[in-house]
Image (cartoon, grey):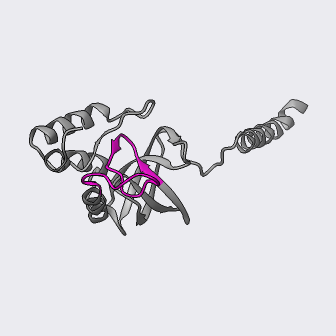
């Protein structure tokens, strides 16, 4: 019967071991998980595809998954055609807004930015898709974050066919 008294201690030991392994592996219990979700407030729009979001009191730089807007703030890179318009549109969509984030399989890029599909909380607008649909962004598919790649490709083709946004304003490249 001594083993019955040991069961609670084994459970405690297992829980501590899992927690410690996660911490030593560089993770934390509040780190985003693949497919995980978070909500936050957009505190700053960097450009057309990158924002700062306050999540649980911490400022996180968030890069939209699956889309790419013309550059406006990249060092040693001139402002690209339609870049200012894309940045302004992103400002109108999310600046100061509450957003829901859904993380992909890869959580961060090489610059340490969170990678997310972004939804405006007040009406559920899928921001990544809106940017492509209105011609402010092109698709940028980087595996393993490909959940909406087909949707984005269809939206891009329609925007291009209808000459929306950058597809009308910028020379073909």
The quadrant in which residue 15 appears is: top right
| The stretch drawn in magenta includes residue 133 | no
Considering only vertical position in the picture, is 170 above or below 87? above
| The stretch drawn in magenta includes residue 71 | yes
Considering only vertical position in the picture, is 80 above or below 35? below
The quadrant in which residue 46 appears is: bottom left
What residue is drawn where x is 56% and y is 48%? Answer: 112
Residue closer to the observer: 26 or 11: 26
What residue is drawn where x is 31% and y is 47%? Answer: 128
Report the quarter where the C terminus lies. top left
Left or right of 173: which side holds 108?
right
Left or right of 50: which side holds 171?
left
Which is the main secondary structure of the residues drawn in magenta? loop
The answer to whether residue 56 is seen in the rendering is no
Report the quarter where the N terminus lies. top right
Q: Which residues are magenta?
A: 62-83
| Residue 96 coordinates in the image, percent (x, y) | 37, 69
| Residue 49 coordinates in the image, percent (x, y) | 36, 52
């Amino acid at each position: 019967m001594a083993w019955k008294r040991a069961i609670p201690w084994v459970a405690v030991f297992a829980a501590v071991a899992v927690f410690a392994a996660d911490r030593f592996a560089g993770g934390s219990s509040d780190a985003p998980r693949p497919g995980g979700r978070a909500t936050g407030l957009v505190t700053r729009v960097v450009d057309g595809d990158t924002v700062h979001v306050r999540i649980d009191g911490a400022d996180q730089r968030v890069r939209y998954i699956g889309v790419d807007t013309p550059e406006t703030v990249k060092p040693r890179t001139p402002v690209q055609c339609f870049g200012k318009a894309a940045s302004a549109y992103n400002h109108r969509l999310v600046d100061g807004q509450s957003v829901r984030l859904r993380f992909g399989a890869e959580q961060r890029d090489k610059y340490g930015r969170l990678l997310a599909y972004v939804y405006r909380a007040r009406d559920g607008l899928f921001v990544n898709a809106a940017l492509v649909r209105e011609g402010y962004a092109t698709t940028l598919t980087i595996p393993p974050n490909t959940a909406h790649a087909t949707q984005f490709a269809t939206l891009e083709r329609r925007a291009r066919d209808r000459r929306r946004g950058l597809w009308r304003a910028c020379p073909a490249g």
